[in-house]
Image (cartoon, rainbow, N blue to C red):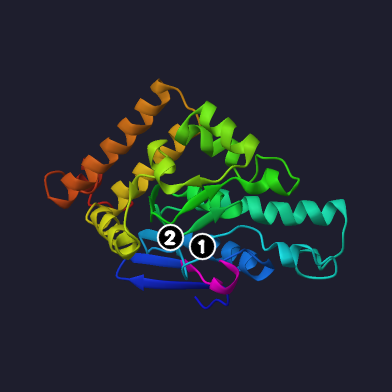
């Protein structure tokens, strides 16, 4: 895939997606918005990439959120089709739809947060499955700081499930900046890594995931997504049981311990009369 504002590299079955606007701290302009939608839509169908690492180019930021300079241009960019309620709604859905695409893609996503993750960048980090951060990383639900509501791009749904209700309310209502150390203490970040070790550690975790069976990895993310959507314990157990039986059956078939076709098909040769 060729992009103007992103860079995608495939290392075996491990994909590395890099926000690539370092001159603007990897802020999301209209081109990046469309390229991100194209990328995540493509990942729903790709089978050659089984795990993804998400990071930012340069030293300033992972993703600093909306490109406010372009957003202020009422004659182009995000508002090229004119200012109306309908066009604002369409633009908002292009942003928020990215979070749905990230969560529904079959690949586990590891965010390697190397700098500022602000606004949309914060939501991209939250939508990942695992978050690593360099000491220079900082996080901010900055939507409320630019006159919008503090809950945007899945923040009201994802954040409290990661850090708890009280901390989520604090971050969304104040729009304050959280450094890497505090983010780690509150559970927003899984691990802190020196900047030079951040991508190597993300690759290491990704390769650990790649050692697992493709179907097992996919069904595990499916189960996590289902539980994230607040199913009951009984529902979660039924889903996990179904997945495990399916995977055990596949392993037994692969090992030749059970036939790959039902006994009736074996008796009559599997053909039609």
Q: Position of residue 63 (x, y in %)?
A: 54, 60
Callout 1: 10 Å neighbours few (<14), some, many (20+)?
Answer: many
Toward the viewer: 99 or 262?
99
**Which tag, 2 or 1, sits closer to the chain's start?**
1
Q: Position of residue 182 (x, y in %)?
A: 43, 41
Q: Indicate the secondary structure of the residue bearing disc 2.
A: loop
Which residue corresponds to the image point at 52% horizontal and 32% vertical from the top-left?
160
Q: Indicate the secondary structure of the residue bearing disc 1.
A: strand
- Identify the magenta region: 18-25
Q: Quadrant of residue 51?
A: bottom left
Say whether residue 218 is left or right of residue 97: left
Residue 104 seen in the current view:
no
Which residue corresponds to the image point at 52% horizontal and 37% vertical from the top-left?
159
Say whether residue 76 is left or right of residue 175: right
**Do tag 2 and tag 1 residues touch (Cβ < 8 Å)?**
yes
Q: Is residue 39 shown above or below 269?
A: below
Circle 1 sits on which residue? Answer: 61
Q: Position of residue 137 (x, y in %)?
A: 45, 54
Q: Position of residue 46 (x, y in %)?
A: 43, 64
Toward the viewer: 269 or 35?
35
Circle 2 sits on which residue? Answer: 114
Say whether residue 3 is left or right of residue 145: left
Residue 99 seen in the current view:
yes
Q: Is residue 60 shown above or below 268?
A: below
Marker count (numbered): 2
Say the numbered circle drawn on residue 158. Answer: none
Whether 159 is among the magenta residues is no
Which residue corresponds to the image point at 49% horizontal and 75% vertical from the top-left?
1
Callout 2: 10 Å neighbours few (<14), some, many (20+)?
Answer: many
Q: Is residue 45 shown above or below 243?
A: below
């Amino acid at each position: 895939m060729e992009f103007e504002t992103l860079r995608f590299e495939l290392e075996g079955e491990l994909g590395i997606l890099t926000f690539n606007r370092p001159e603007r701290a990897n802020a999301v302009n209209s081109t990046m918005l469309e390229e991100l939608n194209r990328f995540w839509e493509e990942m729903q169908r790709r089978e050659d990439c089984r795990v993804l690492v998400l990071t930012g180019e340069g030293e300033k930021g992972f993703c600093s959120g909306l490109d406010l300079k372009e957003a202020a241009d009422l004659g182009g960019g995000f508002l090229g089709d004119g200012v109306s309620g309908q066009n604002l709604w369409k633009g908002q859905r292009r942003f928020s739809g990215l979070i749905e695409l990230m969560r529904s893609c079959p690949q586990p996503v590891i965010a390697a947060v190397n700098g500022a993750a602000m606004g949309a960048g914060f939501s991209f980090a939250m939508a990942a499955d695992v978050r690593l951060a360099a000491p220079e990383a900082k996080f901010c639900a900055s939507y409320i700081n630019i006159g919008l509501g503090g809950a945007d791009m899945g923040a009201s749904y994802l954040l409290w499930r990661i850090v708890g209700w009280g901390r989520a309310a604090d971050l969304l209502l104040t729009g304050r900046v959280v450094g890497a150390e505090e983010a780690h203490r509150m559970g927003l970040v899984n691990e802190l890594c020196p900047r030079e070790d951040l991508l190597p550690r993300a690759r290491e975790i990704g390769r650990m995931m790649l050692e697992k069976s493709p179907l097992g990895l996919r069904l595990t993310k499916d189960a996590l997504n289902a539980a994230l959507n607040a199913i009951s314990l009984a529902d979660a157990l039924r889903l996990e049981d179904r997945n495990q039986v399916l995977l055990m059956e596949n392993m037994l078939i692969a090992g030749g311990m059970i036939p790959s076709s039902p006994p009736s098909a074996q008796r009559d040769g599997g053909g039609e009369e």
